[in-house]
Image: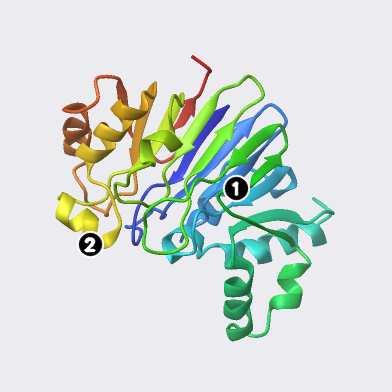
Amino acid sequence: MRLRVIGRSSPYAGPGDATVGYVIEGEDGHFLLECGTGVVAKYLEHYSLADLKGIVVSHLHPDHSADLFPLGFAIKHAVMQGLRQNRVPLFLPSGGVDTFSVALKAFGDLGAHYSEVFAYEEYDDKSRVAIGGWSIHFPKVYHGMNGHGVVIEGEQGERLGYTGDTKMGGNLASFFQGNDLLLCEATVETAEQGEATGHLTAEQAGELATVAQVSQLVLTHFLPGTDVEEKQRLAAMHFPGSIATAEVGKVYSIRAQ
């Protein structure tokens, strides 16, 4: 399994950047994990919509979901060009389809159009879904809205954990226990800010990675202009393993340990 970073910024993207979006790659295709502002254009620099097997959105804050709107038109165009025939599975947290439908109604009664390109599926923390050869489940995290982490298991047993947006919580480490790579938000500067906004500091990301005994930690979800080297240094005070900061365009290989 491979992870490509499409965007890493929040709550908005700086010049030439995108908010959060990642692609999970395998031998038989790929899927999108998150679809924030600016993700579609950067995704299309590397991929064809003909090969897109699905989209997973952890929660519906705009920095994670806003580009679902242009993506729907892009998929429709791909169908018109003969690049694909089938709808793309879109996995949203419970209640997400109704929320998305309300927005589509407000944006010009576009529901019928989007139902032609997306095959909607909702999940909760008990769900396990398949996209291609991947098995995915969705632990409920601590973000003050219906937000989920994502744990993806590949065909060789490799596991990628993704925190989504979350503050520290009692079961957080158990959700990602023993994962081969943890893609972890490191948004705020202090634990007090994190508690108030539902986010993690870099230090907390390091603590989480240590308790969860992950093999590799990749930090993400940064305000534009963040000193990412300082984020990495702070996380390393608490996690002795391999640490990286998400770099747009970079691909990280994930192998079972």
Indicate whether 29 appears above or below 57: above
**Structural crowding at the residue carrying mark 1, measured as other residues with C-alpha within 10 Å and reported as few (<14), some (14–19) or many (≥20):** few
Q: Position of residue 83 (x, y in %)?
A: 80, 50
Is 47 placed left or right of 197 in the picture?
right
Picture quadrant of residue 205? top left
Q: Secondary structure at mark 1?
A: loop
Precedes in sequence: disc 2 or disc 1: 1
| Residue for point 71% across, 31% down | 133
| Residue for point 44% across, 66% down | 62
Is 256 placed left or right of 142 in the picture?
right
Is 204 placed left or right of 174 in the picture?
left
Q: Nearer the viewer, residue 112 or 151?
A: 151
Q: Specify whether residue 14 is in view.
A: yes
Indicate whether 54 appears above or below 145: above
Indicate whether 123 appears above or below 60: above
Q: Amino acid at mark 2?
A: Ala
Q: Which mark is residue 196?
A: 2
| Residue for point 36% across, 29% down | 212
Question: Circle 1 sits on which residue?
Answer: 126
Q: Specify whether residue 246 is in view.
A: no
Which one is in front in this view, the residue at disc 2 or the one at disc 1?
Answer: 1
- The quadrant the N terminus occupies is top right
Q: Amino acid at mark 1?
A: Lys
